[in-house]
Image (cartoon, grey):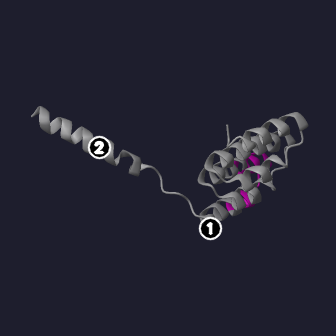
Amino acid sequence: MRYIGSTVLIICLAFAPGCSEPKQTPEQFQARLDAADAMGNPGRQEEARKKIVEDAADAGEADVARKAFEKISNPGTKEDLTEACALKFAKRGDVKAAKSFAELMSNPGKKEEVLRKIANGGQ
Protein backbone atom coordinates (compact mmCIF):
# COMPACT_ATOMS: atom_id res chain seq x y z
CA MET A 1 0.00 0.00 0.00
CA ARG A 2 2.88 2.34 0.78
CA TYR A 3 4.28 1.71 -2.72
CA ILE A 4 0.99 2.80 -4.32
CA GLY A 5 0.90 6.03 -2.28
CA SER A 6 4.44 6.91 -3.31
CA THR A 7 3.65 6.19 -6.95
CA VAL A 8 0.58 8.44 -6.86
CA LEU A 9 2.63 11.24 -5.28
CA ILE A 10 5.32 10.96 -7.96
CA ILE A 11 2.73 11.00 -10.74
CA CYS A 12 1.04 14.09 -9.26
CA LEU A 13 4.34 15.92 -9.00
CA ALA A 14 5.27 14.97 -12.56
CA PHE A 15 2.09 16.47 -13.96
CA ALA A 16 1.86 19.48 -11.64
CA PRO A 17 3.86 21.83 -13.93
CA GLY A 18 1.38 21.17 -16.73
CA CYS A 19 -1.51 22.25 -14.56
CA SER A 20 -0.70 25.94 -14.81
CA GLU A 21 -2.92 28.34 -16.71
CA PRO A 22 -2.45 28.30 -20.49
CA LYS A 23 -0.55 31.22 -22.00
CA GLN A 24 -2.80 33.93 -23.36
CA THR A 25 -2.56 34.85 -27.01
CA PRO A 26 -2.00 38.41 -28.23
CA GLU A 27 -5.65 38.40 -29.34
CA GLN A 28 -6.79 37.56 -25.82
CA PHE A 29 -4.65 40.33 -24.38
CA GLN A 30 -6.10 42.71 -26.97
CA ALA A 31 -9.63 41.70 -25.96
CA ARG A 32 -8.75 42.41 -22.33
CA LEU A 33 -7.34 45.80 -23.35
CA ASP A 34 -10.51 46.56 -25.33
CA ALA A 35 -12.57 45.72 -22.24
CA ALA A 36 -10.39 48.02 -20.11
CA ASP A 37 -10.77 50.80 -22.67
CA ALA A 38 -14.55 50.45 -22.49
CA MET A 39 -14.62 50.91 -18.70
CA GLY A 40 -16.08 54.16 -17.41
CA ASN A 41 -14.12 54.45 -14.17
CA PRO A 42 -10.66 55.90 -14.92
CA GLY A 43 -9.09 54.48 -11.75
CA ARG A 44 -10.27 50.96 -12.47
CA GLN A 45 -9.33 51.39 -16.11
CA GLU A 46 -5.78 52.24 -15.03
CA GLU A 47 -5.64 49.20 -12.72
CA ALA A 48 -6.86 46.91 -15.51
CA ARG A 49 -4.31 48.28 -17.97
CA LYS A 50 -1.52 47.85 -15.42
CA LYS A 51 -2.52 44.20 -14.89
CA ILE A 52 -2.56 43.63 -18.65
CA VAL A 53 0.95 45.08 -18.97
CA GLU A 54 2.21 42.85 -16.16
CA ASP A 55 0.52 39.72 -17.53
CA ALA A 56 1.69 40.39 -21.09
CA ALA A 57 5.27 40.90 -19.87
CA ASP A 58 5.06 37.66 -17.89
CA ALA A 59 3.89 35.91 -21.06
CA GLY A 60 6.67 37.46 -23.16
CA GLU A 61 4.26 39.48 -25.29
CA ALA A 62 6.23 42.71 -25.69
CA ASP A 63 4.01 44.33 -28.33
CA VAL A 64 0.84 43.90 -26.28
CA ALA A 65 2.59 45.01 -23.09
CA ARG A 66 3.80 48.15 -24.83
CA LYS A 67 0.37 48.88 -26.32
CA ALA A 68 -1.33 48.63 -22.92
CA PHE A 69 1.52 50.56 -21.28
CA GLU A 70 1.07 53.50 -23.64
CA LYS A 71 -2.53 53.91 -22.46
CA ILE A 72 -1.54 54.34 -18.81
CA SER A 73 -1.56 57.95 -17.69
CA ASN A 74 -0.11 57.87 -14.15
CA PRO A 75 3.62 58.74 -14.33
CA GLY A 76 4.47 56.81 -11.14
CA THR A 77 2.72 53.69 -12.40
CA LYS A 78 4.50 54.01 -15.73
CA GLU A 79 7.91 54.37 -14.08
CA ASP A 80 7.34 51.28 -11.93
CA LEU A 81 6.11 49.28 -14.91
CA THR A 82 9.02 50.26 -17.16
CA GLU A 83 11.53 48.88 -14.68
CA ALA A 84 9.52 45.73 -13.94
CA CYS A 85 8.89 44.99 -17.61
CA ALA A 86 12.47 45.67 -18.63
CA LEU A 87 13.73 43.21 -16.05
CA LYS A 88 11.09 40.58 -16.89
CA PHE A 89 11.99 40.69 -20.57
CA ALA A 90 15.71 40.62 -19.76
CA LYS A 91 15.25 37.48 -17.67
CA ARG A 92 13.33 35.89 -20.55
CA GLY A 93 16.23 36.69 -22.88
CA ASP A 94 14.28 39.27 -24.90
CA VAL A 95 16.95 41.97 -24.70
CA LYS A 96 15.36 44.11 -27.41
CA ALA A 97 12.07 44.38 -25.48
CA ALA A 98 13.93 44.85 -22.21
CA LYS A 99 15.94 47.75 -23.62
CA SER A 100 12.86 49.33 -25.20
CA PHE A 101 11.12 49.44 -21.81
CA ALA A 102 14.26 50.65 -20.02
CA GLU A 103 14.58 53.52 -22.52
CA LEU A 104 11.17 54.77 -21.37
CA MET A 105 12.38 55.33 -17.82
CA SER A 106 12.53 58.98 -16.74
CA ASN A 107 14.81 58.57 -13.72
CA PRO A 108 18.37 58.60 -15.13
CA GLY A 109 19.90 56.75 -12.17
CA LYS A 110 17.32 53.95 -12.21
CA LYS A 111 17.52 53.78 -15.98
CA GLU A 112 21.29 53.32 -15.81
CA GLU A 113 20.88 50.60 -13.17
CA VAL A 114 18.29 48.72 -15.24
CA LEU A 115 20.38 48.99 -18.42
CA ARG A 116 23.34 47.60 -16.47
CA LYS A 117 21.20 44.65 -15.35
CA ILE A 118 20.08 44.06 -18.93
CA ALA A 119 23.69 44.19 -20.13
CA ASN A 120 24.58 41.63 -17.45
CA GLY A 121 21.92 39.20 -18.66
CA GLY A 122 19.09 40.27 -16.40
CA GLN A 123 21.15 40.04 -13.20
Q: Quadrant of residue 2?
A: top left
- Indicate yes or no whether the magenta region holds residue 119: no
Q: Which residues are magenta?
A: 35-49
Q: Which-is-in-front pick, marks 1 and 2?
A: 2
For label 2, the crowd category at 10 Å Cα-Cα, with few meaning under 14, some 14 to 19 and many 20 or more, is few
Would residue 41 be found to the left or right of residue 4 on screen? right
Residue at numbered disc 2: 12
For label 1, the crowd category at 10 Å Cα-Cα, with few meaning under 14, some 14 to 19 and many 20 or more, is few
Q: Residue at x 76, y 48 (%)?
A: 46
Q: Residue at x 81, y 56 (%)?
A: 70
Percent position (x, y) of residue 83?
76, 41
Give the prevailing secondary structure in the magenta stretch. helix
Percent position (x, y) of residue 56?
64, 54
Percent position (x, y) of residue 108?
90, 38
Percent position (x, y) of residue 84?
71, 41
Separation of residues labelled 1 and 2 (CA atoms): 32 Å
Would residue 106 be found to the left or right of residue 89 on screen? right
91, above or below 94, in the image = above
Judge by depth and name the residue closer to the eye, 35 or 40.
35
Q: Secondary structure at mark 2?
A: helix
Judge by depth and name the residue closer to the eye, 85 or 46.
85
Q: Residue at x 75, y 57 (%)?
A: 66
Residue at numbered disc 1: 27
Kind of residue at badge 2 = Cys
| Mark nearer the N terminus (1 vs 2) | 2
